Image (cartoon, rainbow, N blue to C red):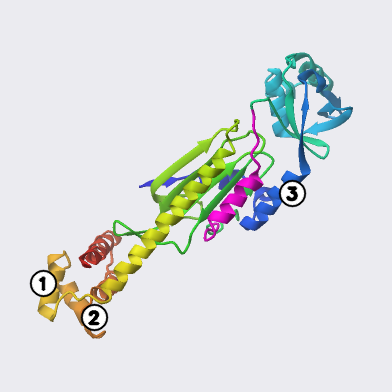
């Protein structure tokens, strides 16, 4: 079992304006971003970096457009100049340096614009996948999933900003048994419309999530990522498949556990007190604890496996030391394997 910290890292790097209370609210934001954005293609030399007040802008079709932090970073990278170097120059000098170092190739640059600003700049090999399209897949196939409890700083696990999207979702009703321990399903999903990060999903089964959004004791961790190249939209099918697999495994395990519990409520462990105690001690339950559980179960009328497990679980909660209690709980849970 491992600890997963993707959501923990997002919790502390996101500003309040990048946090969302629900998946629906996040989706609506991403849809509005998509509808407000449009692509245009320009030759590198036609971008014409210029200074405006204390800012560097680019001109597209005689229209000056502002650069945000990310698109400015991309413009510096396109020009082959360190962003730190440009930031040390006066705006006029910076715009002249960018203009003189822009590539003179005949390959156009893809600009993603929104209003009077440039969200990103890319070469011809980049293929965009909208955050809203990804969230539509999540909403359709992960219907029972929701954000975890609010983090220690008020963050929710649902984030979107000018550079990327990240969502942390769990199924709080999906708890089931895996090797005699309780686990629930969850996943992280992420994307960037502007080239900041890949498309990806990580599915897992976990035992606990703390207020720092660290996922504790995760098992069956599965990762998928896809770069924003020509086949990135095929990645949506992979995202869907990973969520469907997680949901199918949840349903299979939950149904199987329900069947086991139903049988445990019918099958008895013995016909009398002596035979019950004998079976319990044979399976690692101390004789004194077994006798107490038998008395509790007797009040329910039958020594069913379920009534004995229920009685033993109540009794183990009284064990003082957590190490001893955990060991006892493991032995008690193992009694369910006696169901024929």
Compared with residue 253, is residue 37 higher up or lower down, i.e. above or below?
above
Q: Are marks 3 and 1 in contact (CB under 8 Å)?
A: no
Residue 32: assigned label: 3
Give the class, few, some or many, for how many residues have Cα within 10 Å of label 2's Cα (few <14, many ≥20). many
**Residue 131: image x %, image y %?**
64, 44
Instruction: Name the image quarter holding the C terminus.
Output: bottom left
Disc 2 element: helix
Spatial CA span between label 3 and label 1: 67 Å
Give the class, few, some or many, for how many residues have Cα within 10 Å of label 1's Cα (few <14, many ≥20). some
Which residue is at 59% across, 55% downward? 139
Spatial CA span between label 1 and label 2: 15 Å
The earlier-in-sequence mark between 3 and 1 is 3
For residue 208, which quarter of the picture? bottom left
Question: Can residue 185 be seen at all in this image of the molecule?
Answer: no
**Residue 189: image x %, image y %?**
54, 46
Magenta span includes 128 = yes
Q: Nearer the viewer, mark 2 or mark 3?
A: 3
Compared with residue 335, is residue 268 higher up or lower down, i.e. above or below?
below
Compared with residue 241, is residue 316 higher up or lower down, i.e. above or below?
below
Of residues 138 and 220, which is closer to you in this image? 138
Of residues 311 and 242, which is closer to you in this image? 242
Q: Is residue 105 left or right of residue 7?
A: right
**Residue 222: image x %, image y %?**
43, 43
Give the class, few, some or many, for how many residues have Cα within 10 Å of label 3's Cα (few <14, many ≥20). few
Disc 1 element: helix
Return the residue at label 1: 278
For residue 112, which quarter of the picture? top right
The earlier-in-sequence mark between 1 and 2 is 1
Return the residue at label 2: 297
């Amino acid at each position: 079992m491992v600890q997963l910290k993707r959501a923990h890292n997002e919790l502390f790097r996101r500003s309040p304006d990048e946090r969302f209370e629900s998946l629906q609210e996040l989706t609506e934001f991403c849809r509005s971003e998509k509808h407000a954005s449009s692509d245009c293609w320009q030759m590198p030399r036609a971008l014409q970096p210029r200074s405006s007040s204390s800012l560097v802008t680019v001109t597209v079709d005689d229209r000056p457009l502002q650069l945000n932090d990310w698109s400015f970073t991309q413009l510096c990278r396109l020009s082959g100049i360190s962003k730190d170097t440009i930031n040390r120059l006066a705006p006029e000098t910076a715009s002249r340096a960018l203009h003189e170092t822009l590539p003179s190739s005949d390959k156009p640059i893809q600009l993603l614009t929104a209003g009077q600003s440039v969200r990103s700049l890319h070469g011809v090999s980049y293929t965009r996948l909208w955050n809203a399209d990804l969230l539509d897949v999540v909403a359709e196939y992960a219907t029972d999933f929701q954000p975890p409890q609010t983090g220690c700083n008020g963050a929710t696990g649902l984030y979107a900003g000018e550079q990327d999207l990240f969502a942390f979702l769990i199924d709080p009703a999906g708890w089931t048994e895996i090797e005699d321990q309780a686990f629930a399903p969850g996943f992280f999903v992420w994307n960037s419309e502007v080239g900041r990060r890949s498309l990806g999903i990580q599915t897992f089964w976990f035992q606990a999530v703390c207020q720092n959004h660290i996922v504790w004791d995760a098992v069956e961790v599965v990762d998928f990522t896809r770069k924003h190249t020509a086949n990135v939209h095929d990645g949506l099918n992979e995202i869907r498949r990973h969520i469907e697999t997680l949901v199918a495994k949840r349903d299979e395990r939950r149904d199987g556990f329900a069947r086991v519990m139903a049988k445990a409520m019918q099958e008895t462990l013995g016909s009398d007190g002596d035979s019950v105690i004998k079976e319990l001690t044979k399976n690692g339950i101390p004789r004194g604890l077994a006798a107490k559980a038998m008395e509790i179960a007797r009040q329910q009328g039958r020594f069913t496996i379920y009534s004995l497990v229920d009685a033993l679980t109540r009794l183990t909660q009284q064990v003082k030391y957590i190490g001893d209690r955990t060991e006892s709980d493991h032995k008690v849970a193992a009694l369910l394997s006696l169901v024929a």
